[in-house]
Image (cartoon, helix red, strand yellow):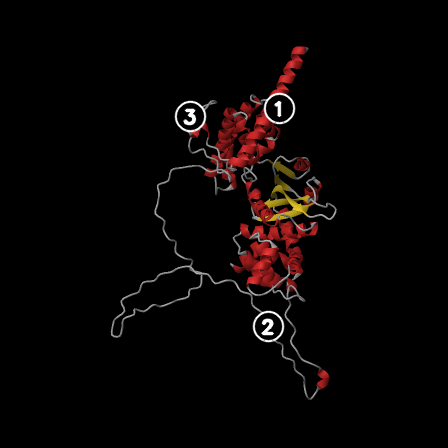
C-alpha cells in the first residue's frame, strides 16, 4: 500500500518536473531562440538513429515553418529585367560634341527604377443646366450624377479602396493614414476614415454572403481560429478576447472569416449549419461537435500533431526526434506527389504512406510515456485523433495538414501587431468582411486595389442576383 502510494507520488513528481522543464525550455526558446519548428535530427547530422536507422536525406517535410540548410555555391547577383508593364519615361542623352554629319550605329539603353508618389485628385463634375426659352414650363434640364458608392461623401471608389487596402492588406493604422494625407496637404479626420471603412464593409456585405455560399458549396473546408483583441464598453481598462473563425475551401481557393465574441462551438455550428462534405481542423474540442453529424467527414492536421512532438524535444529528445523523422517521411511523400491528380495521390498514399503510419502507430502505443509530460501529451494527442489524422490517405483531394488555412490567418496576426485591437465588435465583424475578400484576392493573384476600386464602383448599380460575378476569382476570369 505504502509502496503504491510512493510510486504514485514519484510519478506525479516526475510529471511535474517534466512540465516545468518543458515550460522553461519553451520560454528560453521564445526569448533567445528562433521561433520556427525547424528540425534536422541526429540522422541529418550524421548520427545514428536510436530507434531504427538513419532517415534518407530526401525525406524532408515541406512544412511551412520548417527550413532545410543546404550548402549552395555562392553566385554573383544578377540584376533582373524590370517588368514590361511599368510605364517608361524615355530620356535621350546626346553627346556633348557636335554630331552633325555622323551616322547613328546603335544605342546603349540603361533602365533604372524611379518612384512617383501617389497623389490625390479632385474629381470635378460639371453639369450644365438648360432651359427652353420657348417652353419654360419644361423646367431645368440637367444630367443626373452617376451613382457612387458614397453618395453624400467626398470619397470616390478608388479612394475608399485605397484606405481599406492600406489598413487590412498593408496593416497601416488609420492615424498613420491621416499623417500621410497631411503630407499631401489635406486634413482628413480619423473618424471620417473610420466611416469610410465602415461604409466599404457594408457595401461589400452582399459579396461576403456570396463568398460564404461558395465556400459552403465547395465540399471541402479547412477550419481554424485566431484571437483578436476588441474594445468593449463593458470591460473598462482591458479588451475583450474575440475570435476570427477562418474557413478555407482549398479547391476553389476561397477564404471566409467569421467574427465571434467567443471560442465556443456555437460559432462554427451556426456558420456550418447545413454543410455537407469534408471538414479539416486541428484537435480543438469545438470541432468534435461535427464528427457525428450526418454528411460531414472529419480530417485531422499533421502539422498540429507534429508541433506537439517538436515541443516534446526538450522533454524526451530521443523519442521526439524519432517521431519527427517518421512524420517527415509522410511529408516527403506529399512533396513528391505535388501536382498529381487526386486518384494518383490516393493510390500513392495507400502504397507508401499507410505502411509508415501503421508502423508509427504501433511504436507510439509502446512509447506512451507519462500522461501529463510533454512527450505523453504529444503521443496522446496523435493516438486520440489517429483515425482523423490518417483518413487523408483515403482521399486524394484532402491535404495532409491545415497549413493552407493557417497561411490565410497571417494578415490578421500582422494587423494585431500594428493596430493592436478592433474598436468594437461591429468593427471586428466589418474587418472580417474585408479580410475575407482580400485573402481571396491573394489566393487568385488579384491586385486588391484594382479589384476593390472596380467592385465598389459597380456595386451601386449591379444586379443583386448577379453579385457573385464581382467576387475576385470571377472578376479575374471576366477580365482575363
Label ID, residue 47? 3
The answer to whether residue 471 is seen in the rendering is no
The picture places residue 195, in percent across and down from the top left corner, at 66, 59
**Which residue carries the number 1 mark?**
16
Of label 3 and label 1, which has the lower sequence position?
1
Mark nearest the camera among 1 and 2 is 1
Between residue 196 and residue 135, name the one nearer to us.
196
Q: Which x, y percent locates residue 59?
A: 45, 33
| Closer mark to the observer between disc 3 and disc 1 | 1
Residue at the outermost bottom position: 134
Give neighbour class at mark 3: few <14, some 14-19, many 20+ (Cα, 10 Å).
few
On the image, numbered disc 2 is attached to which residue?
Answer: 124
Residue 158, label in figure: none
Left or right of residue 90: residue 116? right
Where is residue 118? Give x, y as percent. Answer: 52, 62
For the residues bearing labels 3 and 1, Cβ distance under 8 angstroms: no
Q: Earlier in the sequence, mark 1 or mark 2?
A: 1
Towards the viewer: 432 or 316: 316
Q: Is residue 406 above or below residue 106?
A: above
Q: Earlier in the sequence, mark 2 or mark 3?
A: 3
Q: Write the residue at 69% across / 50% down.
A: 424
What residue is at 53 percent from the left and 34 percent from the top?
Answer: 29
Q: Where on the picture, by quarter, is residue 94?
A: bottom left
User: What's the distance in space between the residues labelled 1 and 2, CA to CA?
Assistant: 72 Å
Q: Does residue 384 appear in this view?
A: yes
Amino acid at each position: 500500500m505504502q509502496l503504491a502510494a510512493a510510486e504514485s507520488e514519484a510519478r506525479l513528481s516526475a510529471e511535474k518536473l517534466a512540465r516545468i522543464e518543458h515550460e522553461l525550455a519553451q520560454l528560453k526558446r521564445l526569448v533567445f531562440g528562433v521561433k520556427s519548428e525547424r528540425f534536422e535530427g541526429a540522422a541529418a547530422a550524421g548520427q545514428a538513429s536510436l530507434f531504427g536507422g538513419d532517415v534518407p536525406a530526401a525525406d524532408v517535410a515541406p512544412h511551412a515553418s520548417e527550413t532545410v540548410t543546404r550548402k549552395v555555391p555562392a553566385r554573383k547577383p544578377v540584376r533582373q529585367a524590370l517588368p514590361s508593364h511599368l510605364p517608361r519615361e524615355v530620356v535621350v542623352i546626346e553627346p556633348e560634341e557636335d554630331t552633325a554629319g555622323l551616322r547613328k550605329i546603335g544605342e546603349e539603353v540603361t533602365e533604372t527604377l524611379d518612384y512617383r508618389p501617389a497623389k490625390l485628385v479632385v474629381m470635378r463634375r460639371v453639369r450644365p443646366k438648360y432651359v427652353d426659352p420657348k417652353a419654360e414650363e419644361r423646367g431645368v434640364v440637367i444630367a443626373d450624377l452617376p451613382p457612387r458608392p458614397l453618395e453624400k461623401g467626398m470619397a470616390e471608389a478608388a479612394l475608399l479602396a485605397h484606405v481599406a487596402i492600406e489598413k487590412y492588406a498593408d496593416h497601416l493604422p488609420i492615424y498613420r493614414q491621416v499623417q500621410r494625407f497631411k503630407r499631401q496637404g489635406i486634413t482628413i479626420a480619423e473618424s471620417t476614415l473610420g466611416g469610410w471603412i465602415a461604409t466599404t464593409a457594408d457595401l461589400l456585405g452582399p459579396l461576403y454572403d456570396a463568398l460564404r455560399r461558395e465556400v459552403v458549396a465547395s465540399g471541402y473546408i479547412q477550419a481554424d481560429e485566431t484571437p483578436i483583441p476588441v474594445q468593449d464598453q463593458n470591460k473598462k481598462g482591458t479588451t475583450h478576447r474575440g475570435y476570427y473563425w477562418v474557413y478555407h475551401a482549398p479547391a476553389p481557393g476561397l477564404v471566409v472569416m467569421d467574427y465571434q465574441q467567443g471560442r465556443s462551438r456555437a460559432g462554427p455550428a451556426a456558420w456550418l449549419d447545413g454543410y455537407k462534405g469534408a471538414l479539416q481542423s486541428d484537435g480543438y474540442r469545438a470541432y468534435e461537435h461535427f464528427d457525428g453529424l450526418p454528411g460531414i467527414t472529419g480530417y485531422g492536421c499533421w502539422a498540429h500533431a507534429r508541433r506537439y512532438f517538436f515541443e516534446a524535444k526538450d522533454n524526451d529528445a530521443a523519442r521526439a526526434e524519432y517521431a519527427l523523422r517518421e512524420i517527415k517521411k509522410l511529408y516527403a511523400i506529399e512533396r513528391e506527389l505535388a501536382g498529381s491528380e487526386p486518384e494518383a495521390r490516393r493510390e500513392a498514399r495507400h502504397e507508401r504512406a499507410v505502411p509508415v503510419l501503421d508502423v508509427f502507430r504501433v511504436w507510439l502505443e509502446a512509447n506512451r510515456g507519462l500522461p501529463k509530460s510533454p512527450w505523453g501529451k504529444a503521443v496522446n494527442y496523435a493516438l486520440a485523433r489517429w483515425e482523423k489524422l490518417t483518413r487523408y490517405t483515403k482521399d486524394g483531394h484532402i491535404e495532409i495538414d491545415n497549413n493552407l488555412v493557417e497561411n490565410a490567418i497571417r494578415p490578421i496576426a500582422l494587423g494585431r501587431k500594428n493596430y493592436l485591437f478592433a474598436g468594437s465588435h461591429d468593427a471586428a465583424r466589418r474587418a472580417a468582411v474585408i479580410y475575407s475578400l482580400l485573402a481571396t484576392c491573394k489566393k487568385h493573384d488579384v491586385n486588391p486595389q484594382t479589384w476593390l476600386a472596380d467592385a465598389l464602383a459597380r456595386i451601386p448599380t449591379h444586379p443583386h442576383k448577379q453579385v457573385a460575378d464581382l467576387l475576385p476569382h470571377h472578376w479575374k476570369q471576366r477580365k482575363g
